[in-house]
């Protein structure tokens, strides 16, 4: 069982809180007192729901709140303590107490985040480590929050654009399943006396409908299994990887997937350069955002050229990471000494081009999907009534 222990440190005249495992509160207290600690209180920690840790802890909200408190004049420990008091005894409270404890032990804020049970983004840890040199943690938090909000906004727009087509396809599949499993089997009884005059397409439709009608529980079970497997694959990340691989087979989509990765990479490097990182140190961190192995290799090769003394614009251009406009923008940024601002402009340009493509694709895909679903349902209806038309023509 886990207990929250409050201890008084006589050397610093301050108190600290720790999470300790033990059989009972009395046993925990005695064990700590034998170690020479002054125990103020021992309370049972609240049980947490078995949810993913990142799902229980909103990193962006934490950074936003912490930035606000630091801007008001609070010290880092005071700000963390205030946030832990505000959030009660939940999982976030435990995480904040762990961060506070490491700060009281003398560890820097970046190390407190890195060693925490929540897997804070490497980009946040690196940004905090750089900001600690210049004591600009609040500014670094502001930049990280802005960076994450841009990424979330882009993700929301992509998801929103995919919702309507998914609903159309799902509704069309349900209507088709209903017609094949219920309507077609009952409608086929009308043609039992005219089996020899039914066309081949209608025979196939009646056969498929008969199979669905006779094995409807099996079909529904398979459909439920498919939905469950899809949900599990989505949670595990396999669905996203498979979707990206499938979309990557199309040249046009592959271009815009690369554009999306480059926009995130340039935005990340811009933030890191503002935090005091060198280009050589920023590239490996930004490289982790690329899910295309080829793009990762290009970034690694470009970093080698930068380490050899080549300019970033030349290194990126040599390995196909820029176009004519981008390389000129980088050259201007290198001459003016404001390379981070130039990278931010490049990232914004790439995002705008990507969003324009998504908007146009959505506008084209929505009516096409409606047409496909309509044609599919209409074909089933026509095939069901085709024998009637044949009989009417023969009278």
Image (tube, grey):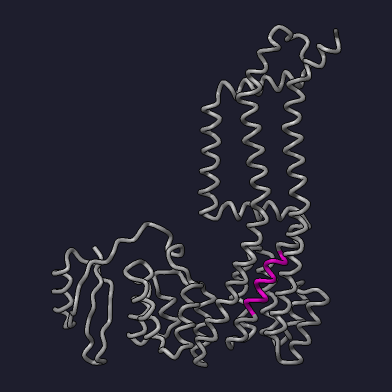
Q: What's the residue at 41%, 58% (across, down)?
A: 51
Q: Which of 54 and 193 is in front in this view?
A: 193
Left or right of residue 134, residue 312 in this image: right
Above or below residue 13? Residue 303 is: above
Q: What's the residue at 74%, 49% (across, down)?
A: 366
Left or right of residue 47, residue 169 in this image: right
Locate residue 354, reporting x and y percent: 73, 65
Left or right of residue 56, residue 308 in this image: right
Left or right of residue 15, residue 354 in this image: right
Locate residue 232, reporting x and y percent: 51, 49
Locate residue 252, reporting x and y percent: 78, 58
Q: In which quarter of the image is residue 184?
A: top right
Q: What's the residue at 71%, 12% (across, down)?
A: 191
Q: What's the residue at 49%, 72% (across, down)?
A: 61
Above or below residue 100? Residue 257 is: above
Magenta range is 258-269
Q: How many labels does the image show?
A: 0
Q: In which quarter of the image is residue 332?
A: bottom right
Q: Is residue 152 magenta?
A: no
Above or below residue 137? Residue 188 is: above
């Amino acid at each position: 069982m886990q207990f929250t222990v409050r201890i008084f440190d006589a050397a610093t005249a301050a108190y600290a809180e720790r999470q300790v495992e033990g059989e009972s509160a009395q046993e925990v207290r005695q064990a700590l007192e034998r170690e020479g600690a002054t125990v103020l209180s021992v309370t049972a920690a609240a049980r947490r729901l078995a949810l993913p840790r990142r799902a229980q802890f909103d990193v962006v909200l934490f950074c936003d709140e912490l930035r606000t408190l630091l801007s008001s004049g609070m010290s880092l420990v005071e700000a963390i303590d205030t946030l832990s008091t505000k959030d009660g005894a939940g999982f976030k409270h435990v995480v904040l107490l762990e961060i506070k404890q490491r700060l009281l032990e003398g560890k820097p804020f970046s190390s407190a985040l890195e060693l925490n049970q929540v897997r804070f983004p490497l980009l946040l840890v690196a940004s905090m480590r750089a900001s600690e040199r210049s004591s600009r943690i609040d500014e670094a938090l502001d930049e990280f929050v802005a960076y994450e909000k841009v990424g979330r906004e882009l993700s929301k727009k992509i998801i929103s654009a995919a919702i309507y087509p998914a609903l159309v396809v799902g509704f069309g599949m349900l209507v088709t399943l209903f017609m094949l499993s219920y309507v077609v089997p009952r409608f086929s009884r009308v043609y039992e006396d005219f089996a020899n005059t039914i066309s081949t397409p209608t025979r196939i439709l009646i056969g498929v409908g008969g199979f669905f009608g006779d094995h409807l529980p099996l079909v529904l079970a398979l459909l439920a299994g498919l939905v469950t497997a899809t949900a599990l694959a989505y949670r595990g990340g396999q669905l996203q990887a498979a979707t990206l691989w499938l979309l990557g087979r199309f040249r046009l989509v592959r271009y815009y997937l690369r554009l999306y990765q480059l926009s995130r990479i340039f935005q990340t490097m811009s933030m890191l350069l503002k935090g005091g990182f060198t280009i050589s140190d920023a590239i490996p961190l930004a490289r982790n955002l690329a899910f295309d192995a080829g793009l990762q290799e290009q970034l690694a090769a470009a970093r080698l050229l930068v380490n050899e003394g080549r300019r970033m614009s030349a290194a990126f251009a040599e390995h196909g990471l820029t176009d004519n406009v981008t390389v000129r923008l980088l050259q201007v940024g290198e001459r003016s000494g404001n390379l981070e601002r130039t990278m931010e402009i490049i990232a914004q340009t790439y995002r705008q081009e990507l969003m324009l493509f998504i908007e146009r694709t959505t506008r084209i895909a929505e009516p096409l999907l409606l047409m496909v679903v309509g044609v599919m349902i209409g074909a089933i209806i026509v095939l069901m009534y085709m024998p009637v038309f044949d009989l009417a023509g023969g009278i």
